[in-house]
Amino acid sequence: MWYALISCDVFVREICRMVADSPHTVDVRFLEKGLHERPDYLRGVLQQEIDTLSAADKPFDAILLGYALCGNSTLGLTARHIPVVIPKAHDCIALFLGSRHRYLEEFNQNPGTYYYTPSAVERGYAVGAESSESKERKYTEYVAKYGEDNARYLLEMEESWTRHYRFAAFIDYPEFRFLDCAKRVREIARKKSLEYRELLGNLVLVKKLVEGDWDPADFLVLQAGQTIEVTNDEMVITASGHVDHDRISSRSTPHGN
């Protein structure tokens, strides 16, 4: 099989690790994590990517999304003539922990936790782990969008994030320990007066995504003409709309709910 994968770049290390072992050919496109700050804009970018990949001269067997619902960023995305596959989860932490049920259990037992992952720390996306360059870049972007006074206010509000958290939890993977990200998160926790916690990560959902093992309990497979809809229950998302059989690619018709 030949898959196209569109993913948030908060998964760079993790997805590349799984793609390297996948029995399928997977073409990967990473999008900047900052797009999450504008869900409507991110949704438009993702739909454009889906449309472009669907119109390719040599169609893929499926388009995979390295996203979850992500603040409704993926709500309303529509498959064209190629199936679109997305994990059933509210946000990416469920994918880092291995299941949405484990994330819910962790969330309920330890509220007030900010989660750190290897790629997020490495790329300066994790709060408190930003480089001076990324902070300056963010300030410049905010000034351009909102003006200087508002930019300062927004950054001050972001810096006050620790008021809402008690724990800094690092999601650890043995294969990425050489990056020494845990040490950086411990230092962030110390500076922000947060209790440091460490959780063992599980990339089983990412592995299943790139290997085509799409259990309907964990993945939504949109067929041509179907759209992502929120369920407001434990399944998180479902497909709405009728399947457009006239537009289905002859290469592959994977199924799922």
Image (cartoon, rainbow, N blue to C red):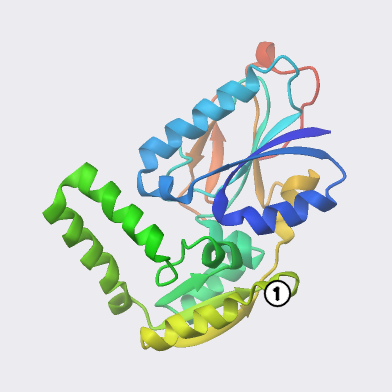
Q: Position of residue 52 (x, y in %)?
A: 58, 22
Q: Please name the residue shown 56% across and 22% down the image.
A: 51
Q: How many marks?
A: 1
Which one is in front, 203 or 20?
20
The extreme front residue here reads 133
Q: Secondary structure at mark 1?
A: helix
Q: Residue at x 55, y 74 (%)?
A: 105
Looking at the image, which residue is at 83% across and 48% down? 22
Indicate left or right for 59 with 181 as reference. right
The crowding category of the residue bearing disc 1, from other C-alpha atoms within 10 Å (few below 14, some 14 to 19, many at least 20), is: few
Q: Residue furthest top?
A: 246
Mark 1 lies on residue: 178
What x and y, as percent, mark residue 7? 59, 45
Q: Is residue 58 left or right of residue 220?
A: right
Q: Position of residue 154 (x, y in %)?
A: 22, 59
Residue at the limit of the structure toward the left, as seen here: 149
Relative side of 109 to 101, left or right: left
Quadrant assignment, res 224: top right
Give the quarter of the image for residue 24.
top right
**Which amino acid is tagged 1?**
Phe
* 136 to 189, vertically: above or below: above
Q: Residue at x 31, y 72 (%)?
A: 161
